[in-house]
Image (tube, helix red, strand yellow):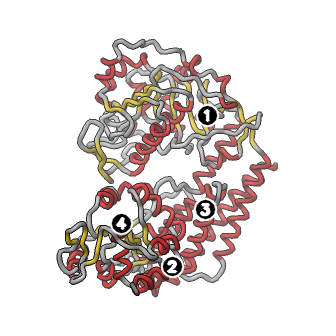
Amino acid sequence: MEQLNHNLALIHASQPELANKFAGYAPSTVTRVLDGNDLCCEGELFYACDANVASQAQVQQYLAKPSHYTLTYKTEETPRYEHQKVINSLNAKARELGYPLAKTNASTLIVLGSGLGFHLEHLVSVNQYGNIIVVEPDNDMLFHFLCTIDIDKLSAHCQQNGGVLTILQPKSAVNFTEQISKLVQQVGYGLFSEMDFYRHYETPLFNDIFDNIKSIRHKWLSTWGFFGDEMISLNHSLANARAHQRFFLGNKGGKKQPTKTTPVLIVGNGPSLDADIERLKTHHQQFTLVSCGSALPVLLKFGIMPDIHVEMERTAALYDLIEPSLTDDFCQNTLLIALNTVAPKLISSFKRSLLFTKANDLGAMVLKPDNQETIQGLYFCNPTVTNLAVSACIALGFEHFVMLGCDYGYKDPERHHASTSEYYNPKSMIAGTKFSNELEVPGNFGGVVGTERIFNLSRTNIEQLLIRNPQVNCINCADGALIKGAEPQRFEQYLLNRTQVNKTKPALDKLLPLADFERLNINEKLLSDTLNGCIDYISAFAHALKQPLNAKKLKQLLTTLTYDLDTQKHRTPEFFLLSGVTRYFSVSINGHLGRMSADNAPDYVHHATERLGAFCDDCLKTLTGLLTSKTN
């Protein structure tokens, strides 16, 4: 018990609740074998031999083929945004200084299963780890671990490499994902730069985590945003408000939008659209048809005019991409649904448009309705246009959805979109876009399909919308990824099942009278306060960068900044502008230093602080310019 008490005293400083749990704890189902170095679980030996010997053999097997993930950000030849210019410069300097070394000098180690802990001792004897995260939900198993291993030695190993030892007890894979997300706020996003995953033994939970670690990792690394993107959002939001565009405010006065029984057909540009496009051409008049982004040119080629077109991308290039489809007939007769972030030039091309504000968006923060009611922003409305289409239509009262061409993946990465889409038009600006099988997910009609990070996040966000809106009935006719909560059904079969249904759809003007939507004003005082607050915050960061910094202090400065941004009670303008870029910088700098000789670290740190300082100067110039233009 001496080792246990010693360990609990150490753990109490950082994880008091965990330490208190095991003070006086008595295991019930897992016991220590008295005459051997083993455990007994429900009458069966756990290791069935000396645990130390078994763990050493397992570690040797793991080291021959480790489960390791390195996160880097590529150098772009023609970077558009300032944060990417910083990343380019950091990459170049790192390579000049000998990056990357073949072996990292401080990886993050996530261990699934504590056992008696001998595997950890063997791992740290051959590799250097910064953060070590021991995942063990079973109290009995963790108790025996704490009775056996000297936590002080493991913790000292982590501290020597700039990290900490943490013990987690998640109840599910989702809970594990959340606990790591919370931990990274405290120890820094550099944790993600180099990661090792070690499974000591199998349980349903450990297998769920280990088998889906690519998908879980994508969730940790998604939707970070960046300064340049948020400034586009802010400028477009201001311009759209000044152009007196109509916005959806939510359920005004608690009054919900009337339920709309007509089925909404959400059309994406997935490869399976090819198989159903002719049927759609014959039957599209039965539905309120919603085209999503790049699906529009495909529909128009087949003479299919959508009732609603949806766009969400904020860059000005979106107009150039869609311009060939902006015929007078289309723009006069189709309603545009878009986010507040979309370029005003595109929105003004349509006779009728309806804008939604994106939740957790800087641009939406400075808009206000005349009656001072709050604006209900949309959640789960990204990262692809289909997310906005479903989210917006649910907000408008639609409850019956059919999804066509919303594949969120592909059976062949060379056929990633419909064959007649602009992705295969050699004259298009999106021609030649490459996709890869980053992971595999269950197919809608069986088997598996390949997908990548953005498509996978888009699918899971659709699932979240369906979970949160149980009144919605969704039919997935796409031969792509399975969407939990949506019923898989071939489009041909769905049409046959509708033979007895009223196939006359109401006019869109009756479904969505524009009188229900408001024009917004700009809260000028809030805008000024927002800009000045951001200027002060970035100025403080720039000042901190001018202090003497070594590698440890620079990494800690970025960790402190991300922690401050992430843990505010409410999302602040500073969070939207800076949280993403500081995460990118933290990962890049930690990753470079982790595969670089310590002798070269001072030179790299000096360069990094100069580049980060220049980034701050550029941000301040941008914000000051917007503030000045507002007052002129």
Kindly indicate the quadrant of the structure image that contains residue 106. Answer: bottom left
* Residue sitting nearer the eye, 577 or 378: 378
* Residue sitting nearer the eye, 11 or 470: 11
Residue at the spot of label 3: 567
Mark 4 surroundings: few (<14), some (14-19) or many (≥20) residues within 10 A: some
Residue at the spot of label 2: 604
Mark 3 surroundings: few (<14), some (14-19) or many (≥20) residues within 10 A: few
Give, as a three-letter code, the residue at label 4: Asp
Sequence-wise, the earlier of marks 2 and 3 is 3
Sequence-wise, the earlier of marks 3 and 4 is 4
Q: CA gap, disc 2 to disc 1?
A: 46 Å
Badge 1 vs badge 3, beta-carbon distance below 8 Å: no
Relative image position of residue 529 (x, y in whole percent): 77, 54
Sequence-wise, the earlier of marks 4 and 2 is 4
Q: CA gap, disc 1 to disc 3?
A: 30 Å
Sequence-wise, the earlier of marks 1 and 3 is 1
Secondary structure at numbered mark 2:
helix
Sequence-wise, the earlier of marks 2 and 1 is 1
Front tag of 2 and 3: 3
Question: Would residue 413 be seen by someone viewing this image from the given angle?
Answer: no
Give, as a three-letter code, the residue at label 2: Tyr
Q: CA gap, disc 4 to disc 2?
A: 44 Å
Secondary structure at numbered mark 1:
strand
Front tag of 4 and 1: 4
Residue at the spot of label 1: 355
Sequence-wise, the earlier of marks 4 and 1 is 4
Relative image position of residue 300 (x, y in whole percent): 42, 25
Give, as a three-letter code, the residue at label 1: Leu
